[in-house]
Amino acid sequence: MEDRNRFPRLRLRIMLAPGQWLGPGKADLLEGIAETGSISAAGRRMGMSYKRAWGLADGMNTMFGAPLVAASRGGADHGGAGLTPLGAEVLALYRKAVTDCEASAADGLSRIGELAALAASDISDQE
């Protein structure tokens, strides 16, 4: 999962088509489904409703040639969900793209952080 307390940071959104993208939230949801075996548990972990989590999972399933998430209905067996092989591959490729982008941009991000800190200190010095 993304470290939301680290600044400056990149957030990668891969645009697949107009209105269709894969970004950090959807990647975190896929990771949560893989770890918990449940769309609802993955959604709860992220602070979202089951309806929202299921809608995102369903949307990702339609963006690719085959589903990323496979779910079985609840009931006596309590259902469940998991990533398909395609889902696991897409998640791994997304995480690698993020890592590659962060490595490539590290010097620039560091300098941007330094400049932002300087600007913030200039503002506080004027108060």
Image: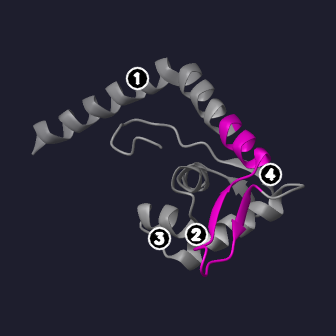
The amino acid marked with disc number 2 is Ala
**Sequence order check, earlier mark of 4 and 2:** 4
Q: Nearer the viewer, mark 4 or mark 2?
A: 2
User: Is mark 2 in CB contact (under 8 Å) with mark 3?
Assistant: yes
**Sequence order check, earlier mark of 3 and 4:** 4
The amino acid marked with disc number 3 is Met
**Sequence order check, earlier mark of 2 and 3:** 3
The amino acid marked with disc number 1 is Ser
Q: State the extent of the magenta-drawn residues as a range.
A: 68-93
In the displayed structure, would residue 81 be above or below residue 10? below
Q: Which residue is mark 1?
A: 110
Give the camera-side residue of 45 and 20: 45
Question: Can the viewer see residue 18?
Answer: no
Q: Nearer the viewer, mark 3 or mark 4?
A: 3
When asked about the image quadrant of residue 52, the answer is: bottom right
Q: Which residue is mark 4?
A: 16
Q: Which residue is mark 3?
A: 48
User: For the point 51% across and 56% down, which residue is it?
Assistant: 36
User: Is mark 1 in CB contact (under 8 Å) with mark 2?
Assistant: no
Q: Which residue is mark 2?
A: 53
The amino acid marked with disc number 4 is Leu
User: Is mark 1 in CB contact (under 8 Å) with mark 4?
Assistant: no
Give the camera-side residue of 33 and 77: 77
- Give the CA distance from mark 1 to mark 3: 32 Å
Give the camera-side residue of 36 and 17: 36
